[in-house]
Amino acid sequence: MTADAIPVGFGAGSTDRPAVEIEDVYKAFGRLEVLQGVSMTVREGEVACLVGPSGSGKSTLLRCVNHLEKIDAGRISVHGQLVGYHERNGRLHEMRDRDVARQRRGIGMVFQRFNLFPHKTALENIIEAPTQVLGMSKEAAVADAREQLEKVGLSDKAASYPSQLSGGQQQRVAIARALAMRPSLMLFDEPTSALDPELVGDVLAVMRQLAESGMTMIVVTHEMGFARDVGDTVAFMDGGVIVESGDARQVISDPQHERTQAFLAKVR
């Protein structure tokens, strides 16, 4: 696959305009405080990687960006629009479910587990949302789905069911499915953590090409090489806070905080 194999997302290349603004976000599950005042900005066309130990709040933060988890305090905006809330008279009021669902159309998400419909083929998995949510005709959706499969290197797997695909192939179908909705932002929650080591490279290659196309991405990952080489910025999280953040190569190669240093020394 060539570097231009995946279509351009929201803008081509990083700009100074914020795509995602996370401001002083708190989230708790019962007495467990998972996010404790997290703030970060992701620019349009930027690849932002979240790294850190398990339980540090990375995946929860990602799920808050598309309101799969409701925040307890703070605010999150995507392309200048509050996610999950309306602001009236200085107070935030939660949106109706259908309005939240409408917001999510522009945010693609790829999970650790592939979440494909087991009784549908790869092609059928991809056309489900465009036809049911966007109202696209089946003919147009099928044509686009075949194009998406070709771009993730799986044009010969359109009629295959998930059980007939490797984990890496299933994850690439999941990426194609997300891209079929024409998102302006892609969220990846440890997309390679459930894969056998020899299958990781194919998925990372697709993500790399997506980044090169200009798609704005937030990636929770334990793949430090990917974070260093593809990420524009890296934020190291621990204990529900961002301990250190900055240029990806600088943070990975020369971390300044002792907690970041200790973590990277173990995972390198």
Image (tube, rainbow, N blue to C red):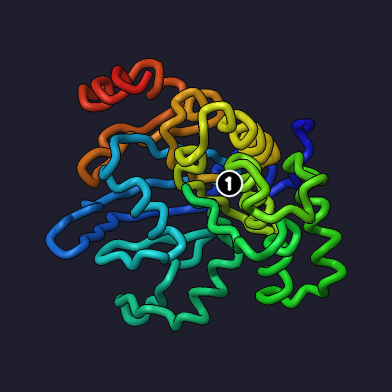
- Quarter of the image that includes the C terminus: top left
Residue at image location 78% in from the left, 57% down from the top: 145
Measured as percent of width and height from the top left, residue 157 is found at 77, 48
Q: Is residue 215 visible?
A: no
Disc 1: CA contacts within 10 A as few (<14), some (14-19) or many (>=20) = many
Q: Is residue 201 visible?
A: yes
Vertical side of 127 occupied by 5: above or below: above
Element on which disc 1 rests: strand
82 left or right of 151 in image: left
Disc 1 marks a residue whose amino acid type is Thr
Residue at image location 52% in from the left, 28% down from the top: 197
Foreground of the two, 229 or 32: 32
Residue at image location 35% in from the left, 80% down from the top: 93
- Quarter of the image that includes the N terminus: top right
Residue at image location 82% in from the left, 63% down from the top: 142
Residue identifier under label 1: 216
18 left or right of 125 in image: left
111 left or right of 179 in image: left
Measured as percent of width and height from the top left, residue 229 is found at 54, 24
